[in-house]
Amino acid sequence: MATAAIAHDWFVVEGGAERVALELADLLPTASIYTSFFDPSAFPGVNETRVHSWPLQRIIGPTRHFRSFLPLYPLYFGGLDLRRYDLVVSSSVAFTHAVRTARGAIHLSYVHTPLRYAWDLDAYLRRSSFSVPARLGGRLLRPWLQRWDRSTANRPDVLVANSEAVRQRIQRFWNRDAEVIHPPVDVDAIQLSTRDDGFLLIAARMLAYRRLDLAVAAATRLNRQLVLVGDGPERARLQSIAGPSVRFVGRVDRPVLIDLIQRSHAYLVPGEEDFGIAPVEAMAAGKPVVALARGGVTETVLNGRTGILFEEPTIEALSHAIEALDTVPFDGSTIRAQAERFSPHVFRAKFRSVLERLGVDPAGGPR
């Protein structure tokens, strides 16, 4: 019988990339799952017997400081031997496209972005709270990471990008082309809502490149209520610049997040996202999105119809966009209809189509 495997960088905190990997696990129900760290308490729906984590987890457990092991991931995933499988699907946030597969097997890599630490390091470190040694270490590693990322980019047979913006990065950094399949967004779990409690909302990992500082500063300047969901290394810095109208609620359960989305006034995306699942979830509730006009949101948000796009990553531009919200008569049903274009059944149909073109049966592997 044909065999299949799924590789994903880490399963520690649920985010958009992890939801894609879980969707792939449902699509390929007999596939083994390979990763670095796996926290079963964060992913209770995953059958643990399917998961193979790296030996380091047996020593330190599924640490939330998984990013601290950056120098080790290329060695681990670059040497991960999956040659026993006929089909390998890697969900690559950074490293899993490098896994080793057998000659004659099919390796399809769903790429969330080429290695950010190699190609976007300045944006990742700029305005961040990383220590001086961490910054120096990152810059020393960058040339080696770029060479490693470019050399291993040829290992997958087929590349699928999560957005047109990522497809263009793949062309620029890897000199390869990719098909675009947008990530699945569970729009059916979020009802169209007419409730509006007036607050702006962000749900994101608190990393410097996301430019959450712009949203905190703009909301403070305008005295607009802003609720931030999530955690990360930049939380303390963001709290230090926040005024009384900004509230940090940390990580919340999924039902609490959906409730916040349905009660919000609008959703903010102040920095460039590879795709951006959360803004599509907000649109599923009929909420407009205010977003920087770069990256994946340019493929999901219709300026003036489902949200407001602003051109420059500045406090002034974001402030003007937030004020413009009240001048546009948004229609919740129109906003939700746009979100439904990114539902899981659309993702599954497109992914199955790619597998079928490769001669793959999703129930197992190559026919």
Image (cartoon, grey):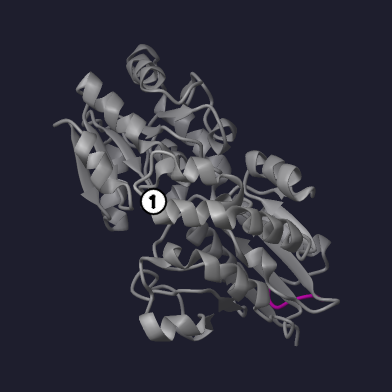
Report the front residue among 210 and 25: 210
Q: Position of residue 127 (x, y in %)?
A: 39, 38
Q: Which residues are magenta?
A: 363-367
Snapshot quadrant of residue 307: top left
Would you name the residue on which mark 1 appears? 132
| Type of secondary structure dominating the magenta stretch | loop
Q: Could you tell me which secondary element the residue under label 1 belongs to?
A: helix
Tell me, yes or no, if residue 266 can be seen here. no
Q: Position of residue 281 (x, y in %)?
A: 43, 43
Residue 32 against residue 248 in the figure, above or below: below
| Amino acid type, residue under disc 1 in the picture | Val
Where in the figure is residue 296, as x and y percent of width and height? 57, 38
Residue sitting at x 44%, y 39%:
126
Was residue 234 drawn as part of the magenta stretch in this picture? no
278 vs 129, left or right, is right
Q: Residues within 10 Å of mark 1 (few under 14, many from 20)?
A: few
Q: As drawn, is 266 to the left or to the right of 247?
A: right
- Camera-side residue of 143 and 86: 143
Q: Quadrant of the C terminus?
A: bottom right
Question: Residue at the location (35% across, 30% down)?
Answer: 214
Please name the residue shown 30% across and 49% down the image: 257
Q: Is residue 247 left or right of residue 328?
A: left
Query: Percent x, y for residue 227?
Result: 25, 39
Quarter of the figure that contains the N terminus: bottom right
- 364 falls in the magenta region: yes
Q: Quadrant of residue 80?
A: bottom right
Residue closest to the eye, 41 or 280: 41
Asked whether 272 or 122 is in front, the reply is 122
In the image, residue 27 sits, relative to residue 110, either above or below, namely below
Image position of 86 with respect to 175: above or below: below
